[in-house]
Amino acid sequence: MPTDLEIQRLGDELGYFSTDLSPVNTPSNWLCANIDSIESTWEKVPDLSKNDLIGLKKLMYPRLFAYTLAYLQSYAPDKILDFHATLAQWIHFDELTLLRYHRSIKETLWAFQNRIRSIASPDIGFPKKNLLQLDVMSIATRILAIVRDAQRKRLLLGQQGHDAQTLLDLLQGILDISDLDIVRPAIWRVTLELSKKSELYPRSLILHDVLPRGTESVTGGSFGDIWEGTYHGDAVAIKVMKVDFTYINGHAKLHAKTFCKEAIVWRQLHHPYLLPFYGVYEWPGELSSRLCLVSPWMNNGNVLQYLKVTPDADRVSLILDVARGLNYLHTFDPPVIHGDLRGTNILVTSEHHACIADFGLSSLVRDSMIPFTPNSSAYQCTNILWLAPEFFQYNEHGNELPRQSLATDIYSFGCLCYEIFAGHPRFSDRCTPYYYPAITAITKGDLPVKPSHQALDGVIWDLMVKCWTQIAASRPTAGEVVQCLLSHRAAVDFSHAFSADSQQSLVEKPLSLPPAMPGKSMTMQDIIIALVGPTGSGKSTFINVATRQSSVVVSDDLESCTQDVQAVSYPHPDASGRNVIFVDTPGFDDTERTDFQVLELIATWMKETQEHITLTGLLFFHRITDSRMRGTPLRNLTMFEALCGKDALENVVLTTTRWDEVQESTGAPREEQILNDFWKPLMGKECKTARFNNTHTSAWNVIDLFNINSPHVLLIQKEMVVDQKDIKATAAFMALVRWWEAVREAVVSKLKRKWRKRKL
């Protein structure tokens, strides 16, 4: 029978799977490769036979199944007959029934696990997170294999009632797992399609502790009324949709496809310049419940209300916020079209930032065939003044209907800018008593009179005019709009009402920080994290993955790419309005500079930064692919300790990287050696450790380890700013001297030994 150690090693290896096959493009091949990987891993363990895994190809959670079976064979062989009887029942299900029973299958496997724990060693390990995530990836890939076949896809999308609800809950569960980015776009589309066909939405979106306030709504619109309420003590906005659902034979029947789509789309979107989504509230009524979407309450109201109360607000900052939010939508995977950009759908946060709201008309780029006919709900008199000219080119005898696009959003953005500067919509003077004069002006490409607001200069006006270009393909992208506005702000000395809250864009290129003026690029509210480590340790990769942008050049060879101190800014995902500024530093193995020059560069930057702002923390990187800690990595660690000083180690995270390049069985012992032999003294001073697994979620899990409310001054900053020491008198410089003295002595000693041998 397998030993505890052998089964634990099996669990580790079952949590690792690498293939060049795509679960999206070739899902069936990926599934076969996944099963082959499980079987080959299984056969490495003595006394385990591939024949034990018959039927594995049909199973949900195949890796958890194999892991559970291995423990049963070792600790509870009398339970194996029951286990195989359960397996026999599962493998006779059709593929849709298996998907619907996924929760029952998982709970059954967990029940067997718990039985084992009741009789086995107390040290028996639970299944690893990676193992379970691979099983969820397997389920997602099964779904993608189904939708690639027309007949099987029709069966899936034809599910109704409880069966459809179970599948929607499964699909949303997959979407909510952050490390499955590769399958998320395709699963998202399937979720939207099934929701549209079944007129249901995932139950995980439902909130139960929402308390409406008052006896009437605060405001209303064509799609619903807004009520104020509370959720767990926080003020929330409750958007009550103008549709109902009733209970038929105990099941909720929804008659609002728009509601379902808005809830599912909004759930996936997270950005500081988008209104956060809390969930769905089913407001009880006498005959039926009212459907509600719940979001944070914004005391400042929409941007038009805000500007009436705060006329001196920085309008350029507001449109830049909207542009950043729009760029996030347009660069999402898959891209999202908002479809209804106008002043009433832009809210203002308590930090005076604009955020995009109301996703009722949003769509994914490939699914944006919304018929904008005169009878369409999307073609309403209330939003005609923000529609692009292509929406009015409908030919009732033609086959092609006007459709939403990224370019129509850009056109609406230009109209929104006009509204923000003028205080009223473009061509609103041509709408009485009918809208036809305004529609004529839009289709002819007429320009309105330029508003007289002092902040609307030639650069902004030219940008708005480009957004209104009649040819959709000639309009700027959202990223180009952001860059234009950023360049404009850099060139003009604005008197910002809220300059401390200004943020860098997702698409902004790395900002080289001149040592003389670091405070110009950072604010007291920013979270500033410096990244330190040798070339190729993953500093630049970490920044690019965390920001989802190719902002920093990555080096995989011996040539150092970080030739200067660089900073990349990214809005914190918690929607607090703060930036996280990643400061990329060159390693002490730079191909162009000596170690002293690198130290001088970093120290000077840190000195100048300390005169303005305190660093929140530091990340030190080490490649887990290095079999030993020696040479360059050890030199970088030595310098790092000297730069920080013992008092600042509380806000240091020692991070291992490149885990995707080694198996767990190889990486884990190396990690243990590093922790025990090299990092243990630092960890004893409250220094933290982490793994970076080359995913967006993993990067932010590392960042969350910092105590952002308690930044610490580094020793070298104290020495150079407070003590006014020259760099050559700092502890870091002396550590560098001692390092190279030790190297010199070792080389001299080696040469002497060789010289003596020659004399003999």
Image (cartoon, rainbow, N blue to C red):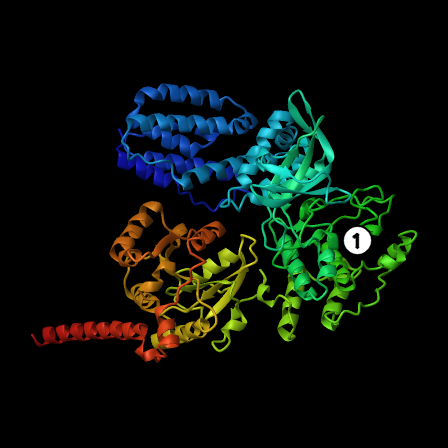
* Residue 132 vertical position relative to residue 437 in the rendered view, above or below: above
* Residue 178 vertical position relative to residue 126 in the rendered view, above or below: below
**Location of mark 1 (residue):** 387
* Viewer-nearest residue: 146 or 421: 421
Q: Badge 1: how crowded within 10 Å, few (<14), some, or many (20+)?
A: many
Which residue is drawn at the image coordinates 64% and 26% (left, top)? 161
Amino acid under disc 1 = Leu
Q: Position of residue 678 (x, y in %)?
A: 27, 58
Quadrant of the snapshot with the N terminus: top left
Let me know if residue 242 appears in the view.
Answer: yes
Quadrant of the snapshot with the C terminus: bottom left
Residue at the outermost left position? 760
Kindly indicate the quadrant of the structure image that contains residue 124: top left
* Viewer-nearest residue: 564 or 153: 564
Asked whether, in this view, residue 432 is left or right of residue 418, the answer is right
Secondary structure of the residue carrying tag 1 is: loop
Q: Position of residue 634 (x, y in %)?
A: 29, 64
Q: How many numbered marks does the figure carry?
A: 1
Which residue is drawn at the image coordinates 38% and 31% (left, top)? 66
Q: Position of residue 330 (x, y in %)?
A: 65, 54
Q: Position of residue 307 (x, y in %)?
A: 72, 60
* Viewer-nearest residue: 40 or 291: 291
Let me know if residue 194 appears in the view.
Answer: no
Kindly indicate the quadrant of the structure image that contains residue 476: bottom right
Residue at the outermost right position? 433
